[in-house]
Image: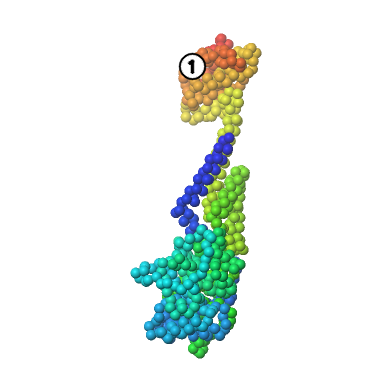
Amino acid sequence: MFKKILYIIGLVFFVMFIFLILKNANLNSFIDSVENRTFDLRQSIIIKEGGKYPNSDIVIIAIDDATYEYILGNYGEWPLPRDVYANIINYLENFSPRAIAFDMMFVKSLKSQNQADLALINCFKKYNNLYTSMNFDNQSADLRTPPDLPEKLTINVKNNSKIDFAGLTYTNCRKILDGIINATSNIGIINVSRSDDGVLRKMPLIVKYKDKFYPQLALKVGINFLGENDKIYEIDKNSNLKIGDRKIFLDKDGSAIINWYGPSGTYTYIPMYQLIKAVNGEKTELDYDFSNKIIYFGTTAASLFDIKTVPTGKIYPGVEIQATFINNLIDNNFIRKADRSYTIALSILLALLIASVVSRINSAFTASLMSLSTYFIYILISYYAMKFGNLWLEVIYPLIFSIFAFTCAYIIKYLIKSRDFELQYKLATTDGLTELYNHRYFQEQIRMQVEQSKRYETNFSLIIIDIDFFKRFNDTFGHQSGDAVLREVAQTLKRNVRSTDIVCRYGGEEMSIILPNTSKEEALATAHKICSRVAEKKFRLYGGRETGVTISLGVATFPADGETAVDVIETADKRLYLAKNNGRNQVK
């Protein structure tokens, strides 16, 4: 019964713990931040093991530090005139690339560069594999009037999930050149999603502006690359965005979790100045076949401020994030995060398993080792689930639940063991009939009293008691009545001594009392009191009858009556028999 009560209490505490964990927003936020770091660690280990390979058909044309220096040296300013890009586009189109995408925004016309802008606009009119980007924000309408955008830039989304895109809904837009907007529908958004720690782990596939959905630049490129131009893109009830035969999981805020392929520089990088030199007929080291490639333009120079922090590195160019995004899309390689309800269920199962291990194994070391091994196995499962199944199984909630279950199980086990120990100790030291201490315990205690009295130069006394004519009593009233008298005499003794006195069953009908720090006079007074109380008491026998009994008592005191335990016992025993021989019901 005691064990059941403890288990119920433990279960109640566990349920309360789960409730408090789930309802504490600050704690959940902290747990999520730690969990994100475990995601980063798993991604880094997978990459180091060579488990992922970037798509070799993606190439990045980088406006890197060398290109930036080349531009300032040859054009005298940044940004470049737009006809430079137009010339590069025309050069690249000779190779028949799959797509050319600019992770750059061509905003406003540059002064005295109308013809240059027009050259770029004409490229967007001419080539249907050319893409560029735009950005949404929440700037005040006082600064910039929110522009209306053409319907052709939107995508139709049927949302059957609980995602409301509140965090990906914007009130304003940093518009690019009207000529480009009018020339093409190949315009995507380059808004990003960062975690609370500033690390970019996911990207929005779609965002909202003026109650309409707009695709991410990489999604726009990928849709056309895959040949998927459905009019309606559906998000099912499990938060999966369906694109053809692909299902891309969207996190609770509507973003896709990116599966990373490596640190910065994972993809093929070509400095843009080499292309400029090739277009201008200058000598260059450029020797690359762009045929059938997806070409991304973007800035990587630190001074141009498009550097992000991602799980695989603190310095990661935005254009390579776009490349990773489209790589995930092409390979259908986005990460899917297990629903929180599944995480809690797994955490509870793991906690129960660990609690079971702790409760069943006696060795604390073995139980601890088995519990750690159980959690370690779960860690390995979560790692390989991400490596081979692109599944993000959380590890921090299971860890917290496991620690709590481990602690609770040990507390309950300790309480049960303590109680079992007390019961075993009681059984080993207590007489089952009278519930007094047994003879073995009496011998241990009297030896201890002798040692303590010698050490501290104190005295103690011993009273040995015998029930008068007990054999005749048993013959007259029966052994069951005799047992009843033994029990009641024992209880009378316990009620008439101090809590520090030790009452024992000495053997048969004999009982004894060890009185620590007690003189001969005090012991005699106690013995006379007990003798009178027993003589005055009516004892209820088996069958409901009542009778009276008397006792005889012998008293000895250490060290006056002996310097060893044996001497004290012999003296008390002799005086007991003296009391019996002198008529019983008395103290000697």
Residue position for label 1: 529
Q: Is residue 137 depicted above or below 459 in this figure?
A: below
Dot 1 crowding, Cα within 10 Å, few <14, some 14–19, many 20+: some
Q: Is residue 575 visible?
A: no
Residue 451 appears at what percent x and percent y? 52, 29
At horizontal 53% and vertical 55% (from top left) the residue drawn is 340
Which secondary structure lies at badge 1? Answer: helix
Q: x, y (%) of residue 379? A: 58, 57
Judging depth in this view, the residue of 415 and 238 nearest the camera is 238
Residue 298 higher or lower than 367, as above or below:
below
Picture quadrant where residue 211 is located: bottom left
Q: Is residue 255 visible?
A: yes
Horizontal side of 76 relative to 382 (left or right) equals left
Seen at 49% across and 51% down, the residue is 22
Q: Residue at position x 58%, y 23% from top?
A: 434
Quadrant in which the N terminus is drawn = top right
Q: Which residue shows up at 56% across the image and 19% down it? A: 488
Please tell me whether residue 407 is drawn above or below residue 243 in the rendered image.
above
